Amino acid sequence: MISVPLFGGDLRRLTDLEVRHMVLLLAALVLQILVIEVVPGAPLWIASTAHLVSYLLAGAFLYVNRRIPALWLIGLGGAANFAAIAANGGRMPASASAFRSAGLRAEDGVEGFVNSVVLAHPRLLALGDVFAIPQSWPLSNVFSVGDVCIALGGAVALHRICNSRLTASMSRKRGARKPAHLGKK
């Protein structure tokens, strides 16, 4: 968010954004928090199903808000993550080397549900958590190509909505009319 004013954008433009069916995104977030943080000891089939359902809810939210700039890129990242998770029974496959680099232990995912786990025979591992923020850095963790798309899509959307110089050429190509994703203020 700090980069928006640095590139001449106006964060107040976010208040004009028309976001529809926010309850879908909130429900997805609540499900993720429940299965990962609140009840990680839930039966694996329940946690895995809830994890998959959370992605479907988030996908529905993205679909109904598809007019918002760059949401397609966030959706692409979510779809990549969903594909990897669905192909592996509701859990994101992770590479053992990425886990080691981030200072995580592969055996952390053996007991109970975790959203990312090193599996013996993962499917679609290339879409899984194969990248790492090293253990020596703050916020060390593993992440996927889908996560990169989600982060990049969020940044592009923020800059487009706030009309920063960073994405000004994208906005000019669309013409001078008011974007459809903004309210009628």
Image: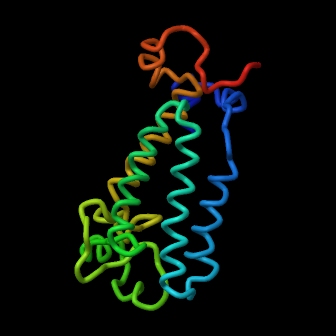
The residue located at (42%, 67%) in the rendering is 140
Question: Which is more toward the observer, 140 or 31?
Answer: 31
Where, by quadrant of the figure, is residue 143 drawn?
bottom left
- Find residue 159 and report its horizontal and vertical position in percent: 52, 30
The residue located at (40%, 52%) in the rendering is 79
Give the vertical position of 35 relative to 62 (above or below). below
Viewport quadrant of the N terminus: top right
Q: Is residue 101 left or right of residue 79?
A: left
Where, by quadrant of the figure, is residue 122 drawn?
bottom left
Question: Which is more toward the observer, 5 or 45?
Answer: 45
Where, by quadrant of the figure, is residue 8 drawn?
top right
- Find residue 34 and report its horizontal and vertical position in percent: 62, 74
- Find residue 97 and report its horizontal and vertical position in percent: 24, 74
Viewport quadrant of the C terminus: top right
- Find residue 113 and report its horizontal and vertical position in percent: 48, 82
Q: How many marks?
A: 0
Which color scheme did the rendering employ for the protein?
rainbow
Question: Which is more toward the observer, 8 or 91?
Answer: 91
The residue located at (31%, 79%) in the rendering is 118
Q: Residue furthest right?
A: 185
Give the vertical position of 118 relative to 4 (above or below). below
Give the vertical position of 164 relative to 113 (above or below). above
Q: Is residue 146 left or right of residue 182?
A: left
Q: Is residue 68 left or right of residue 140?
A: right
Q: Residue furthest bottom?
A: 111
